[in-house]
Image (cartoon, rainbow, N blue to C red):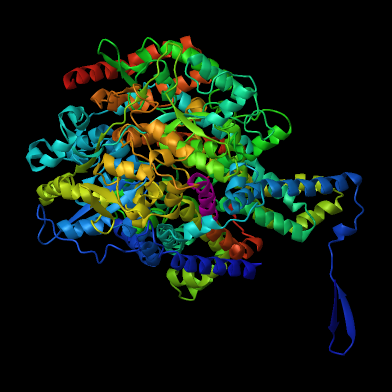
């Protein structure tokens, strides 16, 4: 790649992009073979990773006969958007997406603040009870109450059937605290010290100084929290009881993986209706719902990706 | 890249918004949207709550009914006629037990007024003190008592002798049937593989199945993709294989776990004298590739998929499925397809039995919260109204003059409503079965015949009718199902010893799949008996003798 | 002789000055304490309060009736659990699956990161990395649907491939031998890209001068990887390994639960799913609590063991 630059004296200089001198070293055949294999391996990996997703996408848009005949692989046959029309009419689905979004993004914002506040004393504080504080947090990483105690706690705290229960339940997780603390540790202590000497209090230091310096880890943890909330199935199952507060995963499960009408000994043996072609449509509707649920998350990460590429220095190495 | 993504997202959102508006004003069954809003409906003389009554309810909704009942006339009209407003949170039956647990965890104040037990079980709810027995209130609900009838009382009472739930009653003939691809049988006959058109003995059934297995009957060039006998697993896997159980003379309960022996004892099916023979034969059938290889994961929807995919040769299902899937296959180009309903599989001893449809099912329970709020009497009076003449007419036929007319003393639904069979009938809001009520034979028949006479029905409908009506192919084959009695021992041990990973159903499936020998199966059964199944059997028998 | 005990002020701190030091410290760190307190309140409410409710394991607990209305049964649930002949099989299943997963799934991200690091072509590298994250955003419910889509012997893609090759399709989903395989492969699919993030960032934070030094010493790429890159990521790897071992008795609940069926229950029933089925679904909440407690205690023991082994072997530990 060539760039022309004009120097101050008006002379034109051609700049050539500097490559690594590694590229000029003669490579042994072993290395060449390795490179080729590596590239092929990566390509196979791409196929492996993408195929199921393309399959779902394709089924959701194919015509009924082709789906039934199992001819659909990774491209749609017989364009048929009927499934999507059916979905978009389902207001419950959109409501659940909204709920999931509230929990994921709202919860993420609150979580980040809480996590930073939790990690800061561990990283920069010298105070009585620091060891105790640390143990209290770390212990929760391995020992949890379980499902029934969680039920009871949420009920006793008055958060029954509320999205707040989901947000607060996942507010501070010890694992994330460790990650953030490690990162804080990698910022030289002198920074904090000089700020303290200048008379700043710890809150100011945290919010004005440390957090801007910690963008990579904040972005990473933010993403983890958002995705964790969005994909979470067990917690909403237990903590949310009315359909208007359903999150997306719950709605998904009831649409996609449920047996259609039950004949258990405790429910009625009822006559079933069948719309013409409902069986075929339901496979496509199921897959269309899967696609719709994947879209939000997949479209987020390109935006946050740049924070990863710049090098997330976890410094977990330092312990 | 990002720009493209955000553009795609915006397009998708726009599309969705427009499509919501586009299709919400369809007329269904000849009735315009919101047709009932201005209908002239009188307040009921029999029951009206001045000042209105708000009833909160949690129920199980089936996918075949409209997703939201907003588009239906039923609940708004109830409110006009009786002043009762229902605030219903519909859930799917999947994972319903956990849903109820979550609701219970919210404490008494957060309970609804009416709750359906579903998989959680009436016994479970009663144990928690969540629902109240109705024994003392029977004088408030004479219509319900009359509708149930003396001879069906044992379907209404729970195992502990109390009555807890308002039932839903379906006075309609039995509607499940064995069905098979008659066109494939004819093809096999032509090929000389078999010499009959309808299998009537065990040998003939086997000949049909093996014929399907060995030949390419669906004509797609693939010899091995047809499944001779497709079986669905039911909800928790207890019910798989029950159609075959019946063929061996074992007249099982709904969940295929209990039966009544000839001497009147109530016990588990595994103790039935024919069970060993059953297991051995079925094991062989599985090994030969006759039985659905996926029977442990085959949900009902998956079974229907195989029917539509032209690979199912025979199965046991709702008679109507024969009709709908035959017509689907016609639409897909398989012109001579025909799912013909036939008599149940005849076993080696000549047994050919079919479960009678249970007409009375326990459905709506009144909760302790309603009791605390003093609403019990009003709610019960409402359900009494639901089973009165007025209530029944509303449930089955709708509003006189608008959706039906009385012709020669017989309520007759509008032709457009029944033209599509049950589809539009339910979409409009009639026969709201998840809510419960009494479904009349007359209304059922009108939808069934869809305005036609018997002679004019097409082959698919004829098959459906054959399988359905009590004079048809299943005549004489019905047997009344023994109940599954929820005794204490049953509740205690069901999770671990019946459907658990070492439970009897798992062992049965493993035996069928060849992972366990028949003798080992019975040996393990004895072990399980020792661990608690014997208690279940004994308590069940005791309770059964009392009920009888 | 007069012996007068002399008080040596300079070697003994009297209590009042001790107190003064403490208060001074607290005052200095007041902002830190302001951060610590809310976090502690949260921890107590949401993590430790549930532990108080573990006492439900001593009752035949009824949700609606609460503690007052439920019968006290003492250790009945623990006895029942420990005397169940299947308990040890479930623990064995859990350990087997997690060990296999540790052997195969766990190193994959690191290997992937190392291989990716060797790819010279930057755009290709970026594409592969981007695609590799994507599966993480797909929830378990969706994943299991995809697995069913692909592996169904009657309507799935793999079945078609088998038929094309002239063989009879294998019923993967009901065959106990394939259960672990399906889990591991789908586990790799889900985690290889996402978990590689940490390793990729660790690699990028390795000092470049080390590479130059190695090159000068004549190391080829393989040797560079062996002596520079791997030691650079090893601490991260070990730390994550320890944390993973702490999870040995847990399982990704949703996935296992959704993939279970009666024919593979012998190998697919894990302790958490067993507790869920026998406890929550059968409404024996006391038993579910007891089971959860048992599980947690075992996990803590495992982590402590793993941590102390790691301390002895490599100086890296979590505490």
- Is C224 on the left or on the right of A121, as rendered? right
- Looking at the rendering, which quadrant does residue B487 occupy? top left
* B182 in relation to B408, above or below: above
> Looking at the picture, how far across and down is residue A163, in whole percent?
36, 58
Residue drawn at the location 16% of the way across and 34% of the way down: B163
> Would residue B65 appear left or right of B324 to someone viewing this image?
left
Prevailing secondary structure of the magenta residues: helix
Position of B498 relative to B435 (above/below): above
Asked if residue A283 lies in the magenta stretch, the reply is: yes
> Height in image: C4 above or below C75?
below
Q: Position of residue A75 (x, y in %)?
A: 67, 52
Q: Which residues are magenta?
A: A278-293
The answer to whether A130 appears left or right of C116 in the picture is left
Task: Give x and y (percent) for residue A41.
Answer: 76, 45
Can you say whether C195 is above or below A313 in the image?
above
Give the total of numbered labels: 0
Q: Nearer the viewer, residue C209 or C135?
A: C135
Residue at far bottom of view: A9
Residue at screen point 35% across, 45% down: B447
**Quadrant of the rendered image containing residue B535:** top left
Q: Which sits in the foreground, A192 or B496? A: B496
- B545 drawn magenta: no
Q: Nearer the viewer, residue C15 or A210?
A: A210
């Amino acid at each position: 790649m060539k760039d022309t630059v004009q120097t101050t004296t008006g002379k034109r200089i051609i700049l050539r992009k500097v490559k690594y001198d590694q590229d000029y070293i003669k490579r042994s055949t072993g290395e060449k073979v390795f490179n080729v294999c590596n590239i092929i391996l990566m390509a196979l990996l791409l196929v492996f990773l993408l195929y199921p997703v393309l399959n779902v996408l394709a089924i959701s848009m194919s015509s009924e006969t082709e789906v039934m005949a199992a001819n659909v692989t990774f491209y749609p046959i017989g364009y048929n958007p009927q499934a999507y029309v059916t979905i978009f009419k389902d207001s419950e689905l959109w409501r659940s997406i909204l709920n999931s979004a509230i929990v994921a993004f709202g919860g993420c914002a609150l979580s980040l603040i809480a996590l930073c506040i939790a990690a800061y004393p561990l990283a920069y504080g010298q105070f009585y009870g620091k060891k105790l504080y640390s143990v209290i947090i770390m212990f929760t990483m391995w020992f949890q109450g379980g499902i029934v105690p969680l039920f009871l706690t949420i009920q006793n705290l008055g958060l029954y059937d509320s999205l707040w229960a989901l947000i607060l339940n996942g507010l501070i997780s010890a694992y994330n605290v460790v990650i953030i603390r490690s990162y804080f540790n990698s910022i030289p202590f002198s920074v904090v010290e000089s700020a303290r000497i200048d008379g700043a209090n710890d809150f100011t230091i945290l919010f004005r100084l440390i957090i801007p310096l910690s963008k990579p880890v904040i972005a990473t943890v933010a993403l983890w929290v958002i995705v964790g909330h969005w994909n979470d199935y067990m917690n909403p199952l237990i903590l949310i009881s009315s359909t208007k507060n359903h999150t997306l995963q719950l709605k998904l499960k009831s649409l996609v993986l449920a047996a259609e009408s039950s004949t258990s000994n405790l429910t009625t043996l009822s006559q079933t209706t069948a719309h013409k072609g409902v069986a075929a449509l339901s496979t496509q509707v199921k897959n269309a719902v899967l696609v719709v649920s994947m879209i939000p998350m997949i479209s987020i990460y390109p935006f946050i990706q740049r924070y990863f590429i710049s090098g997330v220095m976890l410094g977990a190495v330092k312990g | 890249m990002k720009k493209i993504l955000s553009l795609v997202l915006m397009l998708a959102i726009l599309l969705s918004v427009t499509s919501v508006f586009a299709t919400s004003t369809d007329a269904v069954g000849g009735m315009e949207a919101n047709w009932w809003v201005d209908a002239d409906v009188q307040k009921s003389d029999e029951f009206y709550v001045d000042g209105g009554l708000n009833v909160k309810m949690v129920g199980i909704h089936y996918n075949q009914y409209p997703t939201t009942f907003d588009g239906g006339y039923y609940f708004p009209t109830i409110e006009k006629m009786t002043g009762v407003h229902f605030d219903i949170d519909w859930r799917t039956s999947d994972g319903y037990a956990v849903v109820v647990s979550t609701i219970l965890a919210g404490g008494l104040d957060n309970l609804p007024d009416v709750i359906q037990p579903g998989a959680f079980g009436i016994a479970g709810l009663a144990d928690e003190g969540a629902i109240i027995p109705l024994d003392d209130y029977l004088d408030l609900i004479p219509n319900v008592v009359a509708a149930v009838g003396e001879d069906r009382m044992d379907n209404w009472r729970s195992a502990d002798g109390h009555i807890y739930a308002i039932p839903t009653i379906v006075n309609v003939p039995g509607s499940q049937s064995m069905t098979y691809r008659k066109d494939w049988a004819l093809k096999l006959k032509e090929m000389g593989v078999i010499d009959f058109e309808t299998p009537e003995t065990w040998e003939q059934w086997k000949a049909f199945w093996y014929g399907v297995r060995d030949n390419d009957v669906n004509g797609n060039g693939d010899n091995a993709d047809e499944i001779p006998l497709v079986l669905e697993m039911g909800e928790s896997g207890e019910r798989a294989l029950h159609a075959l159980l019946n063929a061996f003379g074992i007249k099982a309960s709904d969940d295929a776990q209990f039966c009544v022996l000839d001497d009147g004892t109530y016990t588990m099916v595994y103790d039935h004298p024919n069970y060993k023979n059953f297991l051995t034969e079925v094991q062989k059938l599985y090994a030969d590739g006759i039985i659905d290889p996926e029977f442990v994961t085959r949900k009902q929807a998956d079974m229907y998929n195989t029917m539509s995919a032209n690979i199912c040769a025979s199965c046991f299902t709702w008679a109507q499925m024969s009709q709908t899937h035959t017509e689907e296959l016609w639409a897909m180009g398989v012109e001579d397809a025909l799912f013909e309903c036939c008599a149940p599989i005849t076993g080696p001893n000549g047994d050919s039995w079919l479960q009678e449809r249970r007409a009375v099912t326990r459905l709506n329970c009144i909760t302790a919260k309603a009791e605390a709020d003093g609403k019990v009497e009003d709610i019960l009076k409402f359900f009494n109204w639901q089973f009165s003449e007025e209530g029944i007419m509303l449930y089955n036929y709708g509003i006189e003059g608008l959706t039906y007319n009385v012709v020669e003393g017989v309520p007759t639904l509008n032709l457009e409503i029944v033209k599509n069979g049950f589809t539009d009938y339910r979409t409009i809001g009639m026969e709201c079965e998840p809510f419960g009520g009494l479904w009349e034979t007359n209304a059922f028949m009108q939808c069934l015949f869809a305005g036609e006479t018997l002679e004019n029905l097409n082959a698919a409908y004829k098959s459906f009718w054959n399988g359905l009506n009590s004079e048809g192919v299943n005549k004489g084959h019905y047997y009344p199902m023994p109940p599954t009695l929820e005794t204490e021992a049953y509740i205690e041990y069901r999770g671990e010893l019946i459907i658990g990973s070492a439970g009897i159903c798992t062992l049965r499936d493993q035996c069928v799949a060849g992972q366990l020998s028949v003798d080992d199966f019975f040996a393990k059964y004895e072990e399980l008996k020792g661990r608690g199944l014997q208690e279940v059997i004994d308590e069940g028998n005791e309770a059964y003798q009392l009920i009888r | 002789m007069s012996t007068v005990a002399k008080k040596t002020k300079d070697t003994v701190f009297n209590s009042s000055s001790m107190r003064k030091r403490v208060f001074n410290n607290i005052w200095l760190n007041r902002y830190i304490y302001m951060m610590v307190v809310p976090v502690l309140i949260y921890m107590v409410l949401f993590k430790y309060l549930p532990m108080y409710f573990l006492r439900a394991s001593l009752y035949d607990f009824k949700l609606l009736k609460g503690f007052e209305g439920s019968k006290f049964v003492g250790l009945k649930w623990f006895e029942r659990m420990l005397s169940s002949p299947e308990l040890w099989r479930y623990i064995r299943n859990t350990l087997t699956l997690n060990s296999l997963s540790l052997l195969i799934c766990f190193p994959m991200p690191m290997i992937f990161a190392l291989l990716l690091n060797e790819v010279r072509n930057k755009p290709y590298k970026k594409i592969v990395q981007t695609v590799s994250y994507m599966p993480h955003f797909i929830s378990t419910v969706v994943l299991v649907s995809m697995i069913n889509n692909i592996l169904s012997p009657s309507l799935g893609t793999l079945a078609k491939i088998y038929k094309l090759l002239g063989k009879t399709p294998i019923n993967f989903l009901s065959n106990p031998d394939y259960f672990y395989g399906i889990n591991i492969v789908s586990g790799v699919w889900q985690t290889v890209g996402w978990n590689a993030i940490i390793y990729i960032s660790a690699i990028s934070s390795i000092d470049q001068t080390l590479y130059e030094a190695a090159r000068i010493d004549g190391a080829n790429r393989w040797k560079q990887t062996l002596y520079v890159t791997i030691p650079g990521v090893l601490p991260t790897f070990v730390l994550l390994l320890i944390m993973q071992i702490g999870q040995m008795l847990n399982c990704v609940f949703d996935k296992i639960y959704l993939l279970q069926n009666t024919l593979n229950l012998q190998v697919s029933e894990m302790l958490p799913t067993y507790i869920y089925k026998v406890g929550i679904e059968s409404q024996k909440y006391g038993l579910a609590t007891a089971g959860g407690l048992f599980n947690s205690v075992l996990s803590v023991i495992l982590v402590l063991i793993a941590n102390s082994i790691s301390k002895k072997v490599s100086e890296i530990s979590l505490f």
